[in-house]
Image: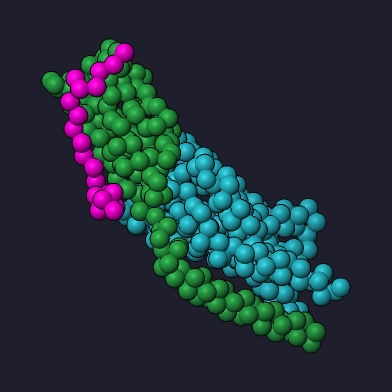
Amino acid sequence: MNFLRKHWYKILGVLILLYVIPNAWTGEVSVQIILHETIRNLYWHVVMWFVMIILFGVSVYYSASNLSSPSQKKDIYAVEFAHAGMAFGFIGIITGMIWAQFTWGAPWTNDAKLNGSAASLLIYIAYFILRSSIPDQQKMVKTSAVYNIFAFTMLMILIGIMPRVMPSLHPGNGGNPGFGNYDDLKGSMAIVFRPAVIGWTCIGIWIANLRVRYKLIETQKELW
Amino acid sequence: MVNKLFSCLFISLFSLSLHASNGRDTIADLNSLLGGVTGVKKSEMGFPEGFEMSETGVITVDTAIEKGVYFFELMALTPDESHFIVNVKYDKLSNPTKIIVNADKIDMATGLRKDGMIWVVVLVSLVVFAGLISYLVILDRKVSKLEKAA
């Protein structure tokens, strides 16, 4: 029972992805003019961004709660979830560049969403730099917690709001129809895409969990 | 077979005076153009005013339509399950009226999924996934051990 309580989300994530991966290759997909079969990247590229936002969301939750009732554990959770989120963000950018090269004709277009996501990743890099630049431990924890909330807000504005206002090539942005408007997504593609988000989120939490535990051991050692 | 050979590009020019009936002119009959049509989907932009399409894929236009150049596109599904994107240009400024209907096949891996051994790719990606997960499991165990020791 203890085993299940500790590892349920890891098992869940693996099982879901064992269903997702074959279906991502062989399932029915929507037929679109420029995308052709590359629409299957929806199951990989888009999912990475969803997972990143969820992990950053968890991170900001711990930062906010760290401000109201400080504890070192919460600080570690906030940093390590942000770290894991960064990994997914970078995978998202690289996969997006590959996809764009073959559908839009260039790896980087001056698209509001591309620049927004690059800017928000830079903001998060600044978060880690900020943490290492303040020598006073308590000050560092407080400042970085506040900064993390700012970073998450900027992320939401830069990749959630701005691309919808400005011209963008992305579906659902700049007046483009969203992926949800492609009829087929409502059926055969949604049953792969949504589980994929849940599955990869579980894996992301697992990675963050490993980092947290490693960090906890490390800080314990420092105290000795 | 003929359909497959020439599926990449269809260009047909119709003379407007040929198909006049009830104040509507036929622009294109997708059924004969693509060798049978099982389904037609209009694009989200819809049709310009004055244009219509029947269930069987016959596109007609009101003869009284204003002078001008009209563009629209739609998607058609043929019996062999190919998808075509059909672009229509209706140029009423030129004399005689010029109609260009252009159908491009959208290549999808329908055949690949049937016999192109896509299962090999599925297998390979599952092995990659299994490798990554076992790596995570090993890390998890190592960290657990350290936690117990600490």
Q: Colour of chain A?
A: cyan
- Left or right of B90 in this view: A9: right
Quarter of the picture holding the N terminus of chain A = bottom right
State the image quarter where residue B148 is shown.
Answer: bottom right
Quarter of the picture holding the C terminus of chain A = bottom right
**Residue farthest to the bottom, as pictured:** B149
Residue A152 visible within the image: yes
Seen from the viewer's position, the closer of residues A146 and A198 is A198
Please report the residue visible at 72 percent of the width from the left and 83 percent of the height from the top: B141
Residue A160 visible within the image: no
Tally of numbered tags: 0
Residue interval drawn in magenta: B1-22
Residue A68, compared with residue B49, is above or below; it is below
- Residue B142 picture location, percent across and down: 70, 84
Please report the residue visible at 63 percent of the width from the left and 80 percent of the height from the top: B134
- Residue A203 picture location, percent across and down: 64, 67
Please report the residue visible at 40 percent of the width from the left and 46 percent of the height from the top: B79
Q: Which chain is green?
A: B
**Residue farthest to the right, as pictured:** A1
As for residue A24 lying within the magenta part, the answer is no
As for residue B16 lying within the magenta part, the answer is yes
Please report the residue visible at 21 percent of the width from the left and 25 percent of the height from the top: B91
- Residue A182 picture location, percent across and down: 50, 42
- Residue A46 picture location, percent across and down: 52, 55
Seen from the viewer's position, the closer of residues B139 and B51 is B51
Residue B40, compared with residue A193, is above or below; it is above
